[in-house]
Image: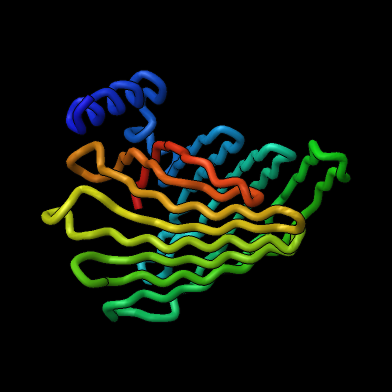
Amino acid sequence: MNLTNLRQAALTLIAIAFPGFASAQLVHFGQFDISRDTRTLALVRALPDGNPQTPDPLLNANYTRWETGSSSALGYMHRWSLTSGGRHNWGVGAGVGVNHFESRGGGDDDTGVSLRAQTELSGPAFGGNYFTMLQLSTFRRSVFFIAQYNPNPEITRLGFDISRYQERGVQQTAFAVRTALDQRRRWFFRAGIIDSQDDVQPFIGIAYNAF
């Protein structure tokens, strides 16, 4: 199957599985990745506050499953912009979350409320643009980092990202290449490798980004 047919098949599957997903704007970002032993789902919705001078607060939901356990969370993040009018945008955020950890390897399950902090930076990069974010949580001392590079769409439909998630006793690192499935560059097909607990596996995924 060539790339054009792959895009068409993916868009058809999206239309069947998620009717009205984008038009209703239920979420502004969604991503699902799957490998042999891992499942990762992330959903983000912006909550417009009517102030164009400040970034919108975010409501997010995350679920990650690996061979010996899973982690899920709901969170709210209020954000502030530290730069304005520049080529590079730097912001910070603070929020709260409700988290659950389940062990399938004989450990103890854990549920609790967390405090969260994050910082994000974006702007132009050579031949395209970049986005980076670091998020910290008090729940099981979790850390999430992502860096994305998006070449100019006139050069290529591809994009690249690397991410790292860790909490007490859990570590995952993923590298992905994504290709835009539509002209507006909101739907993407993803493929890459994930290192989960020192076990490297290929994965595929689908993503939607309306930011």
Relative horizontal placement of residue 210, taking residue 104 as reference (left or right): left
Q: Give the residue at the far left of this rendering.
A: 154
Q: Give the residue at the far front of this rendering.
A: 199
Q: Is residue 193 above or below residue 165?
A: above
Residue 208 location, quadrant: top left
Q: Give the residue at the far top of this rendering.
A: 16
Q: Position of residue 139 (x, y in %)?
A: 75, 58
Rendered residue at 27%/43% (across/down):
179
Q: Is residue 71 above or below residue 92?
A: above
The figure's colour scheme reads rainbow
Rendered residue at 42%/63% (across/down):
147
Q: Is residue 101 above or below residue 3?
A: below
Relative horizontal placement of residue 194, taking residue 22 as reference (left or right): right
Relative horizontal placement of residue 137, taking residue 164 as reference (left or right): right
Q: Position of residue 107 (x, y in %)?
A: 86, 44
Relative horizontal placement of residue 173, taking residue 185 as reference (left or right): right
Residue 160 location, quadrant: bottom left
Marker count (numbered): 0
Rendered residue at 29%/53% (across/down):
159
The quarter in which the N terminus is drawn is top left
Q: Position of residue 20 (x, y in %)?
A: 36, 27
182, 48: nearer the viewer: 182
Rendered residue at 58%/64% (across/down):
135
Q: Position of residue 207 (x, y in %)?
A: 39, 41
